[in-house]
Amino acid sequence: MNFVASFTSLIARFTWLDWLGLSWFMICWIGYERIVDHGWRGRITLLEETHRLRLGWARQMLVRENRIVDAALTGNLVSSVSFYANTSIYIIAGLFATLGALDRFMETAAELPFAHAISREALELKLLMLIAVFVVAYFKFTWSLREFNVLAMIMGATPPKESDPDELELFAQRTAAVNTCAGDDFNRGIRAYYFGMAILAWMITPGLFMIATTLIFIVLTRREFDSDVLRALRLRSVNKR
C-alpha cells in the first residue's frame, strides 16, 4: 500500500499538460509503427521497396559461385547494429548518472529559454521515461543483431544453384524475409532514438514536447512515404534522350 501511495503521489506531480504531451507522444509513436506496418491508403513505403531489394539480393546470391560479397555485406550490417547496441548501453548509463546529479541538471534546465518550474519527482519520472525509451532501443538492436546472425546462418545453408527452381525461389523469399525482419527491428531502434529526442524537449516544457513529437512524426512519415530515396527506388525505367 505504501508503494502504491508513493507511486500515486509521484504521478500527481505531472500537470495536465504533461499528461496531454505524454498521450500525444504515445499516439504518434505507436501510430507511426502501425502506419509503417500496414501502409497508408495504398501508398508504397520505403520498407516495401527495400524488401524488394533484399529479395533481389537473395536471388543474385543463389547464382553466385563465390559469396564473399554477400558475407561482407552481412558483416557490415552486423557491425552497424552492434555499434548502436553498444551506444544505447552508454546512453542508458549516462542517464542513470544524471539521476545522481539531478540538482545540477535542474539548475541547468531552468536557465534554458521557455523553461518552466518542475519538481524533482516529476523530472525523475521524465528521465526514467527517457531511459525506458533507450532500453526499448537496446532490445530492438540486440534482437536485430540476432536476426542478422540467423541471416548469416541461412546464407551458409544456401543450396546449390542446380537445385529445383521452386526450392531456390522459396529459399530466396525466406532469406529476404529474415533480412527484412532484421532491418525492420534495426529501424525501430533508430526510431526510438528519434522519439527520445522529443522527451528531451519535455524537460523544458510540455508544449515544446508536443511540438518536438509532432515534428519528429512528420519527418519520419515523409522519409517513409515521400523521400528522395524512395522516389529513386521506385524508378522503373530510364528515359533515353
Image (tube, helix red, strand yellow):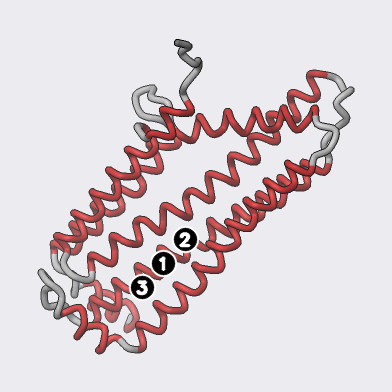
Could you tell me the amino acid type at mark 1? Ala
Residue matched to label 2 = 136
Counting from the top left corner in percent of width and height, residue 205 is at 16, 67
Label 1 vs label 3: CA separation? Answer: 6 Å
Dot 2 and dot 3 residues touching (CB under 8 Å):
no
Instruction: State which quadrant residue 208 falls in.
Output: bottom left
Horizontal side of 198 relative to 224 (left or right) equals left
Q: Alpha-carbon neighbours of circle 2 within 10 Å: few (<14), some, or many (≥20)?
A: some
Residue matched to label 1 = 132
Above or below for 95 versus 157: below
Above or below for 50 versus 191: above
Above or below for 40 versus 141: above
Q: Residue at x 35, y 83 (%)?
A: 99
Residue matched to label 3 = 128
Label 2 vs label 3: CA separation? Answer: 12 Å
Counting from the top left corner in percent of width and height, residue 223 is at 37, 39
The outermost residue toward the top is 241
Horizontal side of 233 relative to 53 (left or right) equals left
Secondary structure at badge 2 equals: helix
Q: Indicate which disc residue 57 carries.
A: none
Quarter placement of the N terminus = bottom left
Mark earlier in primary sequence (2, 3): 3
Horizontal side of 57 relative to 66 (left or right) equals left
Between 228 and 207, the residue placed more toward the observer is 228
